[in-house]
Image: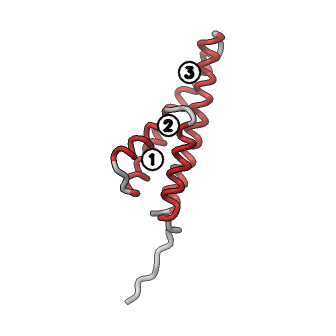
Amino acid sequence: MKKSVLTRYRVMAYITAVMLLVLCLCMVFKYGFGMGKDLTLVVSQIHGVLFIIYLVFAFDLGSKAKWKFGKLLWVLIAGTIPTAAFFVERNVRREIEPRVTEGTPQPVKV
């Protein structure tokens, strides 16, 4: 597996997790203090788009790593639980890093 597959998953996992925390904070201000309605709308839409990208990259990594359905589902759902993506990403990195190659093709011996 190429290193870029793991790297893009990791980047999107962190971005999605941070955006979800920002969205939660916006929701607290919107419903708790009655302010930030427009900001919450913008942040929720941005998080939605980034979450879709996260799903694509996580699914790509899971299919290349040949995960079972339950593990793949847990990784996909981790982007919806605040702070879960941070922990899941760390476990995925530990599992996948030993299987990563640099992506440089090896010459074929004839």
Residue placed furthest toward the left: 69
Marks 3 and 2 in Cβ contact (< 8 Å):
no
63 relative to 43 in the view: left or right: left
Can you give x and y, in whole percent of width and height, for residue 87 in the image? 55, 43
Task: Indicate which disc residue 41 carries.
Answer: 3
Q: Which residue is mark 1?
A: 58
Dot in front, 3 or 2? 2
Q: 10 Å neighbourhood of mark 2: few (<14), some, or many (≥20)? A: many
Q: Residue at x 50, y 72 (%)?
A: 104
Marks 2 and 1 in Cβ contact (< 8 Å):
yes
Colour scheme in the image? secondary structure
The CA distance from mark 3 to mark 2 is: 19 Å
109 relative to 91 in the view: left or right: left
Q: Eyeballing the image, is 96 above or below 84?
A: below
Q: 10 Å neighbourhood of mark 3: few (<14), some, or many (≥20)? A: some
Residue placed furthest toward the top: 34
The CA distance from mark 2 to mark 1 is: 10 Å
Can you give x and y, in whole percent of width and height, for residue 65 in the image? 40, 57
Please name the amino acid that badge 3 sits on: Leu
State which quarter of the image contains the N terminus. bottom left
Earlier residue among tags 3 and 1: 3
Can you give x and y, in whole percent of width and height, for residue 17 in the image? 57, 37
Please name the amino acid that badge 1 sits on: Ala
Disc 2 on helix, strand or loop?
A: helix
Q: Which residue is mark 2?
A: 79
Can you give x and y, in whole percent of width and height, for residue 67 in the image? 37, 52
Q: Eyeballing the image, is 98 above or below 17?
A: below
Q: Eyeballing the image, is 36 above or below 76?
A: above
Disc 3 on helix, strand or loop?
A: helix
Q: Which residue is more in the foreground, 37 or 77?
A: 77
Please name the amino acid that badge 2 sits on: Gly
Disc 1 on helix, strand or loop?
A: helix
